[in-house]
Amino acid sequence: MVQLAKLISTEKISLKNHPEIKEDTIQSYIFENPSVLGLGDLTAIRREKVQPSGGRLDILLTNDDNTTRYEVEIQLGATDPSHIIRTLEYWDTEKKRYPQYDHCAVIVAEEITGRFMNVISLFNGTIPLIAIQMSAFKNGDDISLSFIKVLDRVTYATDEEESFEVADRNYWETRSTPAIMKSIDTIYNDIKEYAPGYELKYNKFYIGLANNGVVKNFVSFRPKKKFFYLRIKGEEDAEIQEAAEAAGIDIAYDSSHKHYEIRLTNHKEYKNHKELIDKMIENSIKYFNISE
């Protein structure tokens, strides 16, 4: 006969009204055990982080590859307007001070009311925001905590996930110019040396790459009339960034979408910087583990 685990009853309690447990206790517990939030394998960076404009951020967390930071605010009891505003202010401050990271605001409260769920849902269309409801249960002298994500951040589709309207070469030669398209062809021909089998895929808003119909935009192009943008996906590289800026390349890194964007005017400008750009493309191919 199989012995069943012992079933026990627990009593749900209010942390806000508990005589001994304070918010600092909950902060310490989450800081030491950030995985309990259910946001993945996170690492705690700091507690009670002082903000330049005043106040203290409850907890600052980061993901396993240190690309996303979570600004966590905790409230015992139900959410209120000041709690939401404080959470968003701290998120905005950290985002402006450390733009190299992706940032996400996290509200943890015992009760996230329907009224404030509506308010938070409005913010969540433009602000990366997660709401987590925390419940406490008593069993004898022990108290267990449960965390349930009731609102997740909105994630935006990548070019690979989005089904853009298909276009053709003529569409882009009209929208841009044959000369700009010829410059793009030159770069594409170089890419084929590193990653054979890839073809240009013409879409309504950009030109990407595909292999046997499978989209893999480790490099993509956005042609204009007098110039074009070359986007190269991959991790940010301080050495490459410094070399590109020293060479006078118009370059920027988008940490949200993890790509470099280079503004080029013609084929000659590409040739002048070909060695560095080719290195970036090779790094992107390695990043995506693309083999021949």
Image (tube, rainbow, N blue to C red):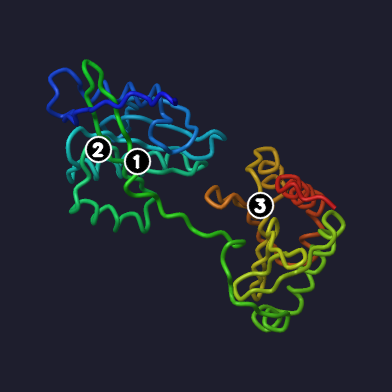
Residue corresponding to mark 2: 109
Q: Could you tell whether 43 is left or right of 128 in the image?
A: right
Amino acid type at circle 1 is: Val
**Residue drawn at (75%, 79%) of the image:** 178
**Disc 1 target residue:** 106
Q: Judge from the rendering whether residue 36 lies leftward or rightward of residue 111; answer left or right.
A: right
User: Could you tell me the amino acid type at mark 3?
Assistant: Lys
Q: Residues within 10 Å of mark 1 (few under 14, many from 20)?
A: many
Q: Which quarter of the picture shows residue 141?
A: top left
Q: Which residue is mark 3?
A: 233
Disc 2 is placed on an element classified as: strand
Q: Position of residue 11 (x, y in %)?
A: 19, 28
The crowd level at tag 2 (other Cα within 10 Å; few <14, some 14-19, many 20+) is many
Above-or-below relation of 97 to 209: above
Q: Quarter holding the N terminus?
A: top left
Q: Which numbered disc, 2 or 1, marks the residue closer to the eye?
A: 2
Which is in the foreground here, disc 1 or disc 3?
A: 1
Which one is in front, 243 or 121?
121
**Kind of element beneath mark 1:** strand
Residue 79 percent location from the top left of the image: 20, 42
Q: Please give the name of the residue rendered at 71% of the width and 71% of the height, measured from the top-left corner.
A: 201
Seen in the picture, residue 183 relative to 242 is either above or below; the reply is below
